[in-house]
Amino acid sequence: MEGVEVERPLKLHFIPYLAPGHMIPLGDIATLFALRGQQVTIITTPSNAHFFTKSLSFANPFFLRLQTVEFPSQQVGLPEGVESMSSTTNSATTGKILAGAMLLHGPIQDFMEKDPPDCIVGDSVYPWVHDLARKLQIPFLSFSGFSLFTVSLMETLRTNNSINSDTDFHLDSGSYVVPNFPHCITMCSKPPKLFTGYMEMVLEWMIKSNGLIINNFAELDGEECIEHYEKTTSLKSWHLGPVSLIRRTNEEKAKRGNENVVSVHECLSWLDSKHDNSVLYISYGSICYFSDKQLYEIACGIEASGHKFIWVVPEKIGKEDESDEEKEKWLPKGFEERNIENNGLIIRGWAPQIMILSHTAVGAFMTHCGWNSIVEAVSSGVPMITWPVHGEQFYNEKLITDVRRIGVEVGATEWCLNGVEEKEKVVSRDSIERAVKRLMDDGDEAEEIRGRAREFRDKARLAVQEGGSSQKNLLALIDELKRLRDHKPLD
Ligand code: UDP
């Protein structure tokens, strides 16, 4: 019966963090395992279930199911149904959602004790997954949602104690060079202390895992980074992405995350009517908000660039029924009359991002550098205008601009604590116009950047095909987890 034992599917329990940028990719990763015949359960809270139901439709429900546990709304003082980082525009609520997520430990442990899996795939923000896995005597894999380039860079800063010491800073310019890292990376702004303190804990929790799951392909992170991280931590990383590439048709691409606020058909016919590479796509992800003043500068900058655009603004900012007076706080007078329909679209709420990015009319993406947005743009060969705001986004920017050279910076230097915090600085309309023209005006530099972006798109697509690096990693990981379960010696 030995052969039968090896073929027995793995039982995997996934625990995503309660933010779209974590739930969406982890849902896709769960689907990857289910499509390979493994039995996957995603554990989430009732209000977040809809984020996964679209992923579930990809795979046979026998292999991929959803388990909900109650969110402790009362305990953390939140109204019923506010359970995701995308439901808030203020730091106090953000903190309460994080506190609620930490309290999921109890109900998730109860569920797992009744129905123990062979392995847990847990978001790296949960400090208790390690204890839970140890209690159940099973391995756990950690998912941060970051690239390994960024994890490795943060780990290097942590082990060199660089962030906390001022010795590595050039005090005149305020910049510093990351020491002992495979690439020469100069950072021009310092992260908030609260962020580095928190990240140091998360990096330690990651190291306690049996390996990292990365939504990237090895070619974009680069062998040198992978080796560097494995050498400094002795931890293996499994590159399985870009995971959004499991969606092939426009319908599959459009059904992802929240409900779209635009008609997919209208969005596609608008894009179909435009020339290749002629449209700038602008989005700052699911949890990042700008002041009216900043939005106004963006509007002026894109109008001055003279390029066509799709601009996604959070629904809480651009309301359909807002008065002219309210609108003119963030949109110059007559902007819509001059631009909307022919030159541009404003999407007020959730947009079908990967469907838009994969359209040939899209020629550049102005992005806040959330890792999912970056890897989705790379998968479509779309060069980027980088505008990091908070968290690890400033490190992601370096990979895209300095290392892979498939994007240009807008010049954002204010490193906020989160996406909803009030920002002190405003990126000017001139900087925005300059960056847009640099990529969209068909100069030699733009052509070179576009060429490199196409090369990485091709590599990304190869990686997820049969025999590609990410496909091979997935099969090897399944194999290794089965060996661990069956207590067979590792190769
Ligand atoms: N997204 C989307 N439509 C939107 C906003 C976001 O589909 O209108 C998706 C996007 O494709 C990505 C995720 O939400 O998969 C956002 O993750 P990212 O890491 O880019 O940024 P975050 O929201 O976590 O800051």
Image (spheres, rainbow, N blue to C red):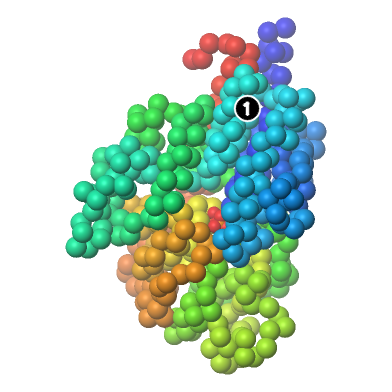
- Residue 100 image position (x, y, % from top left): 66, 47
- Whether residue 50 is visible here, answered yes or no, is no
What residue is shown at x 65% (from left), y 65% (from top)? 351
- Residue 42 image position (x, y, % from top left): 71, 39
What residue is shown at x 55% (from left), y 26% (from top)? 476
Q: State the image quarter where residue 352 is shown.
A: bottom right
Q: State the image quarter where residue 386 is shown.
A: bottom left
Q: Residue furthest top?
A: 1
Viewer-proximal residue among 352 and 272: 352
Name the residue beneath numbered marker 1.
Answer: 132
Q: Is residue 250 above or below residue 430?
A: above
What residue is shown at x 42% (from left), y 72% (from top)? 424
- Tally of marks: 1
What residue is shown at x 59% (from left), y 59% (from top)? 92
Amino acid at the residue labelled 1: Leu
297 relative position to 244: left or right: left
- Residue 53 image position (x, y, % from top left): 76, 48
- Residue 371 image position (x, y, % from top left): 50, 52
Q: Identify the secondary structure beneath mark 1.
A: helix
Viewer-proximal residue among 39 and 330: 330
Query: Label 1 neighbourhood size at 10 Å, few (<14), some (14-19), many (20+)?
Result: many
Q: Is residue 4 above or below residue 22?
A: above
